[in-house]
Amino acid sequence: MARIAFLGLGVMGAPMARHLAAAGHSLTVYNRTAEKARDWVAQHGGAAAATPAAAAGGADVVISCVGRDADVEEVTIGPDGAFRNMRDGSLYIDHTSISARVARKLAQEGAQLGIACVDAPVSGGQAGAEQGKLSAMCGGTADAIAQATPLMQCYSARIVHIGEAGAGQLTKMVNQIAIAGALQGVAEALAFAKASGLDTTKVLEAVSGGAAQSWQMVNRWETMDAGKFDFGFAVDWMRKDLGIALDEARSNGVALPVTALVDQFYADVQAMGGSRQDTSSLIRRLIR
């Protein structure tokens, strides 16, 4: 069993760490809000650390699931970051959705310290994390992925090695671009159905078995119709991810017109007070 330092116990990190503990691994956890770390330990065992560096002391593996680029850099290469206390031959896995630039930077700095790095953002949301059925899209060397896979299998149903460092993050951008377009399509379709006076339950039955079917339609049509938006991944986080994708698109010359439009619609939802509502609240921009 591995000695693991787990950094970040939010709605995704806490259940992921729980699956690792349930599999018999020894965990030391860190969270910016120390009370969350203490509460997690009280429920699942292990130990809590005051800093990422302290958590990493003696660990075979450090796993992070935090917020943004700056947060990942803080817990790894910051003054109290884990890299300062990780030994030669150890493994670092990051499940945060961040820029490919930072993922590559950490892989380079890790290599100089003898640390194997994997960027492995995940899809599946809070429900996937709770159920241990996330999809992990991974960047890094084949050896690093091989080391990381048995651990990621504790909370992932699908693990795909995409390519070198940063490839996992680029793939997560692909994922979010596709979701943004799918949600916009479902939101517009539902708005049209409601404005036309159709029975939206029967409409869903009719169209969800054909070419229009999508995960978003099957899982969010009814809740969007009911005005319920408390299903995990928040608008604030989606805008963060779309911003990363749009920045990357500007650098590689790809046009993302639908993504840019949906990002602005989410900005409108934020202005309407929906920052913490889930991404299906996009419908609020179309039905007021």
Image (tube, grey):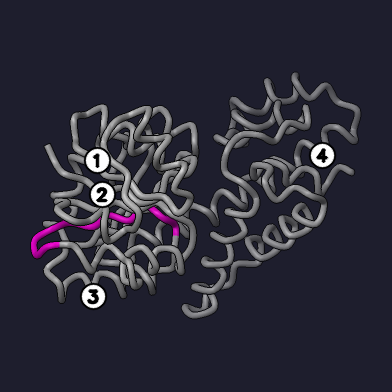
Q: Residues within 10 Å of mark 2 (few under 14, many from 20)?
A: many
Q: Amino acid at mark 2?
A: Ala
* Prevailing SS of the magenta stretch: loop
Q: Which residues are magenta?
A: 87-97
Q: Amino acid at mark 3?
A: Glu
Q: Position of residue 139 (x, y in %)?
A: 28, 60
> Where is residue 155, by image quadrant?
top left
Q: Is residue 152 magenta?
A: no
Tell me the CA gap for discs 2 and 1: 6 Å
User: Which mark's residue is nearer the viewer, 3 or 4?
Assistant: 3
Q: Residue at x 44, y 34 (%)?
A: 128
Marked residue nearer the N-terminal end (3 or 2) = 2
Tell me the CA gap for discs 1 and 3: 24 Å
Q: Label 4: which residue?
A: 191
Q: Is residue 54 left or right of residue 286?
A: left
Tell me the CA gap for discs 4 and 2: 46 Å
